[in-house]
Image (tube, rainbow, N blue to C red):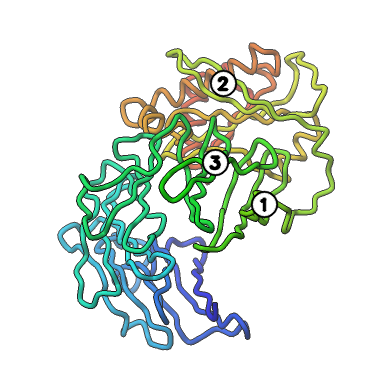
Amino acid sequence: NKYMAYKIARAGSDWNEIFVMDMESGNLLDDHIMWVKFSGISWKDDGFYYSSYDPPAEGEELSDKNEFHKIYYHKIGTSQDEDILVYENPEFPQRNCYGGTTEDERFLLVYESESTSGNSLYFKDLNKKNKEFTLLAEGFDHDYGVVDNIGDKLLLSTNDGAPKNQLYMVDTKKPEKENWKVIIPEKEEVLDGVRLIGDMIMVEYMKDAHSVAQLYTIDGQYVKDIELPTLGTLAGFSSDKGEDIAFYGFTSFTFPTAIYRYELDQNKSTIYRKAEIDFNADEYETKQVFYESKDGTKVPLFIVHKKGLELDGNNPTILYGYGGFDISITPSFSVSRLVFLENGGIWAVANIRGGGEYGEDWHKAGTLQQKQNVFDDFIAAAEYLIDENYTSSEKIGIMGGSNGGLLVGACMTQRPDLFKVALPLSL
């Protein structure tokens, strides 16, 4: 815990630069890594792994193709031109590769991808000199992620054969797929995150687009639930392997983000730090309903407003959606949104297909030839709000950014009669 490595991006560029700070003094070291993109920072001994491209030609920094992604190791106190090339795949110049280490820094994991979903996975035991990478999972049809290691074994989360994800224990001495052992099998809820805490496994599930947390033994036996403050989103669960204390963030539509300290032996959470905002959450309510889309699919919809709202069809309403890239839109807090709610507005979030709210099948049902499902789901959400007298076509606006901007653009084109205002955002 002596140094902190961090990235910056100048002027919104995808190019990152890595700097290293002495945590005690706050001073920057001379270490400065350029031409970093699509990368993490993973420590090993007195250095770290990162991903970058070759330096672009002068004048082509923002227009050159992203090709030949590589993983390097940088040792603190040395210049970038001394960094060690750890991994590259010159046969496939447009693939991306990312290197990460287990908490004990024993295993180096390399994730290789071709698009926004699906990856291959390699590992190397860094305790063994000159050992080559071992292919653990091949192809790009599924997602594979290592949670951590327990001695020689890796905890592996994947949607391979389980669209809502399941957890395996993989023996690195027998890494072939037929030797993988299921620790926590697929459930109705989406397995959304796994951490080791003390001698247990903490599993975060997504149930109808909100968080549920449970504790399991190392061999996958259910122990108990972790009680969360309300219906909302668990984020940033952080713990050290073997330690009985963890921290996590939590938020909801009318619940400002707070950091909680969790004590495993007491199964108790206490507020460690919270945002101080002058408003009374008890004056608002959040409900979740399920409506039918055009093809009969049930889709969840969050509706947030002041208590005592009159359902007269005359309430200003913003309907928000995204619907893409396996991204789940879960409850979150916004001060600017709160101003809208305080003035009698309704905030509604439709968890439409294309996202990850119900696993990979839900995601794929809103992609490629099925993309129209996304627009149909969003249109049906607006029709539900109007039919139930929350609002009217004269009082409803739709909003989304990035992929959600595409969503809004398509819906305002297909059903201009249904919406009074459309806000397709670029971000």
Element type at mark 2: helix
x, y (%) of residue 260? 68, 54
Q: Separation of disc 2 and disc 1 at Cα?
A: 42 Å
> Where, quadrant-wise, is the N terminus in this rendering?
bottom right
Callout 3 amino acid? Leu
**Dot placed on the residue nearer the N-terminal end, 2 or 3:** 2
Q: Which mark is residue 381?
A: 2
x, y (%) of residue 161? 29, 36
Lateral position of residue 131 relative to residue 74, left or right = left
x, y (%) of residue 422? 58, 30
Q: Residue at x 37, y 53 (%)?
A: 155
Q: Which mark is residue 425?
A: 3
Q: Separation of disc 2 and disc 3 at Cα?
A: 19 Å
Q: Which mark is residue 12?
A: none
| Image: 114 above or below 316 | below
Callout 1 amino acid? Gln
Quadrant hosting residue 366: top left
Element type at mark 1: loop
Q: Which mark is residue 266?
A: 1
The answer to whether one can see residue 203 in this image is: yes
